[in-house]
Image (tube, rainbow, N blue to C red):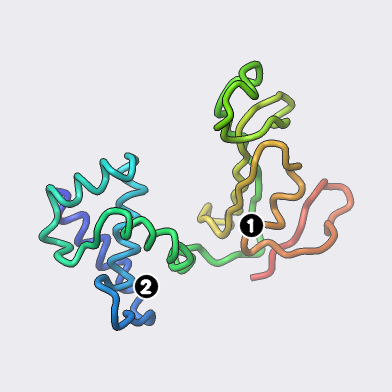
């Protein structure tokens, strides 16, 4: 599949889900175009400038009313909640877990004033970075997620993931277990 066909197929799938969201009268792009471009940016995996150069150089014809680079990325930031439509529905059975993401070695902590992440424990070892919490349904589809710096305790992250019910654990023999309602 060539890239133009992929972008077209992705746009049609996104547009099917976001038909109910109206376009603002002063907006240049439809909501489905903004989400499609955001997904393309995530899939491309390059920086903001490189993505915008690639998009304007090769695929400007697909998005003729494409705004200027900084305005496009402000749109992504402002309307990131539109992607919640693509999260899966929770089921009775599910899995939730946190994963440590080490950004630098703990020995190098504090050497830079622009350090991203904090020092904390993950999988019984020290890391400097962050933690990602994923909530999956019984089919392995993502229901919710949360992220924080590594110094946040694992048992506080699941409460931030969407679709996770608040309240006390339901099984006293399983640490931090909770039942999800369909």
Q: Residue furthest front?
A: 113
Residue 125 image offset from top left, x and y in percent:
71, 24
Residue at mark 1:
161
Q: Of helix, strand and loop, which one carries label 1? A: loop
Could you tell me which residue is drawn at 69 percent across and 64 percent down? 180
Q: Who comes first in sequence, dot 2 or dot 1?
A: 2
Residue 62 image offset from top left, x and y in percent:
14, 61
Residue placed most toward the observer, 82 or 10: 82
Q: Which mark is residue 17?
A: 2
Residue 59, quarter of picture: bottom left
Could you tell me which residue is drawn at 33 percent across and 46 percent down? 43
Discs 2, 1 touching: Cβ within 8 Å:
no
Q: Of helix, strand and loop, which one carries label 2? A: helix
Residue placed most toward the observer, 21 or 27: 27
76 relative to 126 in the view: left or right: left
Residue 126's place in the image compared with 23, above or below, is above
Distance, label 2 to label 1, CA atoms, is: 22 Å
Residue 112, quarter of picture: top right
Residue placed most toward the observer, 109 or 148: 109
Could you tell me which residue is drawn at 59 percent across and 49 percent down? 134
Residue 154 image offset from top left, x and y in percent:
73, 43
Residue placed most toward the observer, 91 or 127: 127
């Amino acid at each position: 599949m060539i890239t133009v066909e992929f972008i077209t197929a992705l746009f049609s799938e996104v547009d099917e889900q976001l038909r109910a969201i109206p376009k603002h009268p002063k907006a240049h792009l439809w909501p489905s175009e903004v989400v499609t471009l955001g997904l393309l940016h995530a899939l491309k995996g390059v920086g903001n400038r490189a993505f915008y150069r690639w998009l304007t150089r090769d695929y400007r014809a697909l998005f003729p009313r494409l705004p200027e680079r900084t305005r496009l990325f402000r749109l992504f930031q402002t309307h990131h909640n539109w992607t919640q439509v693509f999260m899966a529905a929770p089921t009775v059975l599910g899995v939730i877990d946190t994963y440590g993401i080490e950004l630098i070695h703990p020995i190098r902590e504090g050497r830079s004033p622009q350090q991203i992440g904090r020092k904390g424990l993950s999988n019984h070892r020290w890391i400097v970075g962050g933690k990602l919490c994923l909530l999956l349904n019984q089919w392995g589809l993502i229901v919710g997620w949360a992220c924080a710096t590594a110094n946040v305790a694992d048992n506080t992250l699941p409460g931030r993931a969407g679709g996770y019910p608040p309240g006390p654990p339901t099984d006293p023999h399983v640490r931090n277990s909770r039942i999800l309602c369909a």
